[in-house]
Structures are given as C-alpha cells and as structure tokens.
Image (cartoon, coloured by chain):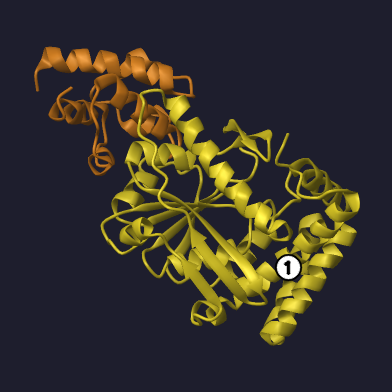
Chain colours: A orange, B yellow
C-alpha cells in the first residue's frame, strides 16, 4: 500500500465519517488499525456512510467485499483497489 | 398489568383458533377484532381520525364503519397467518401477479431483493409465500409486549421466513443477507422517528428510509408487495414492477424520491381496500 496515498485516503475518509455519522466520535483518533465495529455504526447508519464514501471517492464498492472488512485499514485497501 | 391482560387475551384468541375449523376460527377472530374496536376507545379515535385525514371516508359514520371493518380484518389476519398452509398450498386461494422483472430476480438464487409492504391485507402470508423462492428476513422492531412477542414468534408458521432486528449491531448484516441472494422484507408504514417526511395521503409522514438506502447502497432491486383478501381465506398477491432510482450524488434527494414512490404505491393499494389497513397507528405526528 502506498503510505502517502493511504494517508490521504484516511484523511478524506475521516471527513466523510465526521459528516455522515450520527454518533459523536473522536474521528481524528481513527487510524488504519481501528476496528470498524468500534465506530458505533449499526446496520442502518452504515448505509449513509457507505453512500457518502462512494460519492466522495467516485467509485462503487461491492457490498460483498465491504462486509468482509474489519478495520479502517481494510476499507482503505478496498478503496485503493477500486481506484480511489 | 396491561401486558399480562394482553398476553392472556392473545392466548384465549389462539385457543379459539386452534379448536375451531378455519371458517369458524376466522369468524371468531373477526368478532374479537370487533370487540377490541369497541373496548379500546383511544385507539378507535386514532383510527377514525386517520381515516378522515386520509380522505378514504366521506364522513364520520363511514370512517367508523371502515375502522370497525379494519379491526375485524386484523383479527382475521391472526387466524389466516396461523392457518396459512390452507392458502399457500391452494392456487385457488392465492392468485399471484408477478411482473417479469421481479420474477427474474426471484428465480435467480444469486440476486437479493428488497420487498416493501405495509400493514395492509395479510403481510404475514405474503412473507411466507415469498420464502418459497428464497430465504426471507423480515426486519422488525420488537412488540411493546415481550410476552405477546414471544407467543407470536413461537406460533408463526415459518417456512424460510425469520424476523431480524431493525437496529442490528452488526453493521454489515443487511448487506450480507442481500449479497447472499436473500430477500429483505420491510413494513414501511409506521411512524419513523429517524425517518424523513414524505407525503402519505397528502400529509407529511415520517417514513423509514432503510429500504431506499439499501437499494442505493447495495444496488439491490426493490419492489412493493400487497396481499389483499378477496374472500375468506382467499387472496390476491401483487408485486410492483422493480422500482429503480439511479444515484444522483445527492443522498437526501435520492432517498426522498424512492420513499415518495413507495408511499404513493402503498397509498393507492390502501385506497383499494381501506378496511384491510391498520388505521389505529399514529402515523401522522
């Protein structure tokens, strides 16, 4: 993974999370190793975030791939694989 | 105390359903529905107010008649759901209208489907019929009375139909089900605290956005299903052609467009059978 590219994606991802999330969270503390389950999303709130992430990066994610991710780093890798 | 009474009323109703043949059980349940209409005055007032607001009755007398009919209908839904095999296994009792595009999805084991309905006709039979094609997960919130909830869950005939909670702590739960080619079924016509305002019978009503968001994010086809009673233990089940909403980049606008379409479809179906709708819910708050 390109460290600089991943860092930029992480920064943009934090911004999307900050704008989309309903729950308060310290988004600046989110790093690649952060487990997704610790971000406080449920089966409904995650949908808003995924829509906004796809729009931010101009890509379409395969939901089957998304549900396999466990950490923010894995999401970033998925975004990179899809051309983000 | 109220929960206790509700639980034993439900037990009594089920006892009658178990002991009587289907036609008599249906009359028994309709009579209980009528009794409930007479006894639960606050709910009765809500129903009459909703019927008048929706404009499906010309005056208060007509609204009362529709409300009482709907209360009897809800009793019959209970019986029909318990005796659903009589309906599901008899093509004379269940006439089905499936558009070609929906049929193609139902017959493809790899494609998920979002099916939306309301508390109209018999949604339980509809769910069980759907599960002939694919496993069905019905998204629901728990009943207010946990004892009645437990009783209801233990008595429903299941086939491949199961209930799952609306707020699942596993964020990927719904996406995974759809990715596995299952059907996700939702009733969208109750007040949605976290929903958006969309017209329902000409008045803004807080409406659930889950079906719309799943359609947009999972890119899964979406349809509206109605299972209307045409005679005792006899139904007409129809699905809308697939509802397609291309993404515009404006999430709120996309969701609003889908929710409006769904509400319009459901409203039209309710107008065809207003005495088969659950009017006692405070839809407009």
Q: In this rendering, is residue B118 above or below A49?
A: below
Q: In this rendering, is residue B184 above or below B106?
A: above
Between B54 and B136, the one nearer to me in the picture: B54
Query: Which chain contains the residue that carries disc 1?
Result: B
Q: Position of residue A50 (x, y in %)?
A: 34, 30
Q: Quadrant of the N terminus of chain B?
A: bottom right
Is residue A5 shown left or right of residue B50?
left
Residue identifier under label 1: B75
Residue B19 visible, this angle: yes
Quadrant of res A77: top left
Is residue B118 shown left or right of residue B91?
right
Q: In this rendering, is residue A77 above or below B113?
A: above
Q: Position of residue A48 (x, y in %)?
A: 41, 29
| SS label for mark 1 | helix
Identify which residue is drawn at 26% across, 27% down. Answer: A72
Residue A31 visible, this angle: no
Between A81 and B197, the one nearer to me in the picture: B197
Between A3 and B16, the one nearer to me in the picture: B16
Q: Residues within 10 Å of mark 1 (few under 14, many from 20)?
A: many
Q: Position of residue B227 (x, y in %)?
A: 57, 63
Identify which residue is drawn at 36% across, 23% down. Answer: B249
Q: In this rendering, is residue A14 above or below B167?
A: above
Quadrant of res A61: top left
Q: Position of residue B71 (x, y in %)?
A: 77, 61
Task: Pick out the residue farthest to the left.
Answer: A2
Identify which residue is drawn at 81% across, 70% down. Answer: B32
Q: Quadrant of the C terminus of chain B?
A: top right
Identify which residue is drawn at 78% across, 77% down. Answer: B28
Is residue B147 shown left or right of residue B212?
right
């Amino acid at each position: 993974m390109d460290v600089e590219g991943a860092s930029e994606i992480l920064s943009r991802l934090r911004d999307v999370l900050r704008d989309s999330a309903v729950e308060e969270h310290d988004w600046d503390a989110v790093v690649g190793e952060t487990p997704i389950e610790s971000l406080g999303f449920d089966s409904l709130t995650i949908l808003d975030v995924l829509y906004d992430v796809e729009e931010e990066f101009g890509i379409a994610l395969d939901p089957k791939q998304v549900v396999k991710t466990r950490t923010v780093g894995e999401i970033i890798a998925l975004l990179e694989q899809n051309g983000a | 105390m109220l929960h206790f009474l509700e639980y034993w009323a439900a037990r009594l109703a089920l006892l009658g359903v178990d002991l009587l043949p289907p036609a008599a059980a249906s009359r028994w349940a309709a009579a209980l529905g009528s009794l409930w209409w007479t006894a639960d005055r606050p709910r009765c007032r809500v129903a009459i107010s909703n019927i008048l607001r929706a404009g499906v009755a010309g005056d208060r007398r007509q609204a009362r008649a529709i409300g009482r009919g709907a209360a009897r209908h809800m009793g019959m839904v209970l019986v029909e759901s318990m005796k659903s095999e009589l309906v599901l296994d008899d093509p004379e009792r269940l006439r089905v209208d499936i558009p070609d595009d929906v049929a193609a999805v139902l017959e493809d084991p790899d494609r998920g489907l979002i099916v939306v309905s309301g508390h109209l006709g018999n949604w339980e039979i509809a769910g069980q019929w759907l599960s002939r094609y694919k496993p069905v997960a019905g998204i629901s919130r728990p009943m207010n009375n946990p004892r009645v909830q437990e009783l209801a869950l233990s008595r429903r005939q299941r086939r491949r139909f199961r209930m799952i909670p609306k707020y699942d702590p596993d964020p990927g739960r719904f996406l995974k089900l759809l990715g596995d080619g299952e059907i996700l079924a939702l009733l969208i016509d109750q007040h949605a605290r976290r929903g958006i305002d969309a017209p329902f019978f000409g008045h803004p009503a807080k409406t659930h956005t889950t079906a719309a968001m799943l359609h947009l994010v999972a890119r899964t086809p979406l349809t509206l299903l109605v299972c209307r009673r045409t005679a005792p233990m006899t139904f007409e089940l129809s699905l809308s052609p697939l509802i397609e909403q291309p993404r515009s980049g404006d999430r709120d606008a996309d969701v609003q467009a889908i929710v409006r379409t769904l509400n319009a479809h459901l409203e039209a179906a309710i107008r065809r059978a207003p005495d088969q709708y659950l009017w006692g819910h405070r839809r407009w708050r």
